[in-house]
Amino acid sequence: MEKRCVKNLIFGLAAGIAGGGITTIGAILGLTTADAIWPAFAIGAVTGALVHHAKQSITDMIDNRLGTLKNRVEKIRRDIGDIHGLVRLGPYTQDLPLPMGGGWALTGDSAALLAREVLARKPETILELGSGVSTLILGQILKRNGRGRLLSVDHDPEWANQTRRFVEFLGLGDVVTVLDAPLKEIAAGSQAANWYDIPKSSLDTLGAIDLLLVDGPPQARDNPQAARYPAFPVLRDRLSAHALIFVDDASRKTESKMVGRWQTEDSGWHSQWFDTVDGVCILTRK
Ligand SMILES: C[S@@+](CC[C@H](N)C(=O)[O-])C[C@H]1O[C@@H](n2cnc3c(N)ncnc32)[C@H](O)[C@@H]1O
């Protein structure tokens, strides 16, 4: 009985080893036949597609989250810039019906920089291209300076009217004039552009410009040329000897290229760049 068991065990083991060997050889031979290539290829392709899909989904998810995070950081950056500026502008903004310009207005930090220049330089004449909350801040500072006039032009009659209403409301009518200046095609330098149609008589009445604020017209989305480029070629000869040009939105490529073009066309101007939320460039004569 015991002998038979041992015999059966040995026989079973031998059969198992032989069977395993035959199975392995069969598998190797099977895989090397042309028939096995396509199933193996299909399995490889499906696995590859699954891995690629999973990777893509994860990448998209990370991109989405990064995009949201970037937007939030940008909003916080803008808010901090605004708050910093508005705190510094406190004495001139207490009566202002803020917010008024939304995303279009000079941000607080840029407005504070502008206020600093106007308080320090006490300009007699300011020409502003693009009216809004900046018009009201400038008006208040001119009143405080006790001298100076501001001519603010706007292409949008409704917007100009709204600015005018606030100018009256704040009692700034004696130092601020808001002028309607529809956009008209003009030749500026080597380029044709839609720019403010400012009556010559209004510019003559204003006299030599001590401070030129370039914050309009709005940049057309489909126009790679800077909408504000004509400001310098059109007004250059009207700028006073100690004039300052304040360019808002200077961190935009169109605006930085525009300033570069101005300086190429007239090398007599020095530029100073400020890292405010939308960027500012101040140009003064060398
Ligand atoms: C950059 S904005 C000028 C902003 C102004 N300098 C200020 O700081 O408030 C240029 C032009 O955009 C137009 N604009 C201003 N705010 C706007 C708004 N919230 N919606 C539509 N157009 C606006 C006006 O015609 C304005 O002259």
Image (cartoon, grey):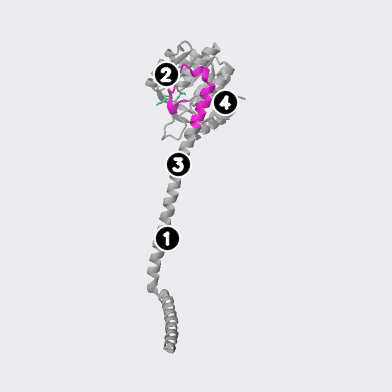
Q: Name the kind of residue labelled 1 in the image.
A: Gly
Residue 96 is situated, as x and y percent measured from the top left of the image, at 45, 18
Question: In the rendered structure, are the residues bearing label 1 and label 3 in contact, judged by CB atoms less than 8 Å apart?
Answer: no
Q: Where does label 3 land, which residue?
A: 67
Front-most of residues 106 and 21: 21
Residue 191, position as x, y percentages in the image:
46, 31
User: As shown in the figure, which amino acid type bears the numbered disc 2?
Assistant: Thr
Q: Nearer the viewer, mark 4 or mark 2?
A: 2
Element at label 3: helix
Would you say the residues marked 2 and 3 are in contact, meaning their CB atoms lie under 8 Å apart? no
In the drawing, what numbered circle is on residue 283? 4
Q: Amino acid at mark 4?
A: Leu
* Residue 194 appearing in the image: no
Separation of residues labelled 2 and 1 (CA atoms): 62 Å
The residues tagged by marks 1 and 3 sit, at their Cα atoms, a distance apart of 28 Å
Residue at 44% across / 20% down in the picture? 153
Disc 2 target residue = 163
Q: Kindly tell me whether mark 1's CB lies below 8 Å from ligand 1.
A: no
- Between discs 1 and 3, the one toward the N terminus: 1
Q: Which residue is mark 1?
A: 48
Chain part drawn in magenta = 77-105
Q: Amino acid at mark 3?
A: Gly
Asked whether the beta carbons under mark 4 and mark 2 sit within 8 Å of each other, the answer is: no
Of callouts 4 and 1, the N-terminal one: 1
Task: Judge depth for marks 4 and 3 and give the one in front.
Answer: 3
Quadrant of the displayed image that contains ligand 1: top left
Specify which label sits upstream in the sequence, 4 or 3: 3
Foreground: disc 2 or disc 3: 3
